[in-house]
Image (spheres, grey):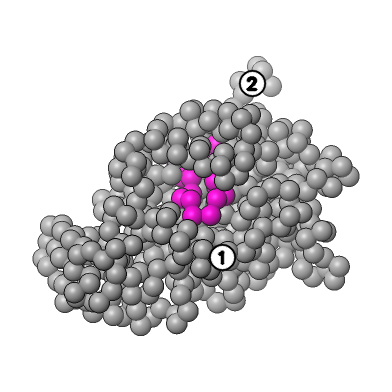
Amino acid sequence: MRSVPLNWSVTGPASSAALAVGIRRCRAALPTRRASILSGATLCAWLGVVQSANSQSTTTLHAESAFGIVIPSPTEATAAVETLEEQRQQLFARLESELGLSSEQLARVRQVFEGSPILGQGNPRLSVHPVGRAECRAALAERPLRPGDAVCGAPFMAALYDQQVASAGPDAAEVCIDQFEFPNIPCEFPVVHVSAREAAELCQAVDKRLCDAHEWEGACAGSLRSADREYAWGNDRQTMRRLHNALRSRVWAYGPEKYHVLCATSSYKTPGCPGAGFAACGSNTFPSGAFPDCVSPFGVYDLHGNAAEHMSLPLTPSQLTRNGGSGQTEMKGSWFIFSNYEAHEDDCHWRAPDWHPSQVMSRNSHSNYHLGFRCCKNRARETASDGAGASQQRSAVQPDTADVPESSR
């Protein structure tokens, strides 16, 4: 990263003095340990510049002379791609090189992407990433992330189990979860503008499945409890949510107290973004794993911040994806603006209202610029004992009857 004078100008009154005060306050508020791969001074200077753009001020910030710090230029922080197709081809190459996907798996992944005009890592003409891939990799070489669990049989996956059981451990796990948001590669940007159906199809394409809501919650909180303890079976969705939220323990992946600065929550919306839309909203995300302290006891990263995440919310035991079913849409976590605008609660066990509700496999399921996903996978030993294997996982991504003409049901 080189030292550059960073010029940022939009319409409105200039206020570089106010910006300097804001940066000093930001630096004072940061923890003494490094929360992300950027130093506190660099992070705050970057945020101050972006904030000036979003508040419609005009400012020229010479980072080195004014603050004695080094700040990345936007061209260094963002991948040099011009089109969505170029972005996708780079992603497919990394899926092969980093995860070792087979030609059959890659073909299935490509097929899902080809069915969408917007599926990718954000609109490349609008998205501004505060940190680039190379910068992330260089920092993580000095501070490695936690490795995945070998028992999962796939790269970058963490084994989940009930910590309250004395004999529990990775070998007792019945399910594993991706350590990072899809594509589940450290220092790669999350895939967004993905519908719940596409998320389920992409998990299936790499021989995994979309997570059930309680699995994500357990991965975040550090203990996976049984589905029967986590769902009030026999009630409607609203009642199930109300009962669950009333009794939940409030914890975050990183500890018992909310502290957004530890996670990828310090970016901003694209100026003029109305709340949705590929053409108006950039996906201003960070590389996965760029905030090493944003990690759960199981070693799962970015469960808060970066991208919110799709999963399946079962209303009956038969809808559990681990058993081959498919439930209703559920979105979890928070996303990249939460240090500046906390849109809703984001503790591990909180269940959201039924925003944009549909069946997971509905062709009209929701997508947005800040919404991604991660995958889960049944342990091989579970497959042998109860049949919850590949054949059942594939059945989870068959069309819902809501998408099938009544005469064909």
Quadrant for the N terminus, please.
bottom left
Residue 235 lies left or right of residue 273; in this view the side is: right
Mark whose residue sits in front, 2 or 1: 1
Quarter residue 256 falls in:
bottom right
- The correct choice, above or below, for 294 with respect to 327 in the image is below
Q: Residue at x 36, y 59 (%)?
A: 130
Query: How far across and how far down the image is residue 320, in percent?
Result: 72, 45
Q: Whole-percent x and y of residue 264?
A: 45, 63
185 sits left or right of 335 in the view: right
Residue drawn at (32%, 55%), measured in percent from left and top?
Answer: 76
Task: Name the foreground residue: 212 vs 374.
Answer: 374
Q: Amino acid at mark 1?
A: Pro
Which amino acid, by three-letter code, is at mark 2? Glu
Can residue 229 be seen here?
no
| Dot 1 crowding, Cα within 10 Å, few <14, some 14–19, many 20+ | few
**Residue 211 screen position, x and y as percent:** 65, 48
Task: Name which of mark 2 and mark 1 comes first in the sequence.
Answer: 1
Reading the image, the residue beneath label 2 is 406
Q: Which residue is mark 1?
A: 144
Specify the principal SS of the magenta part. Answer: loop
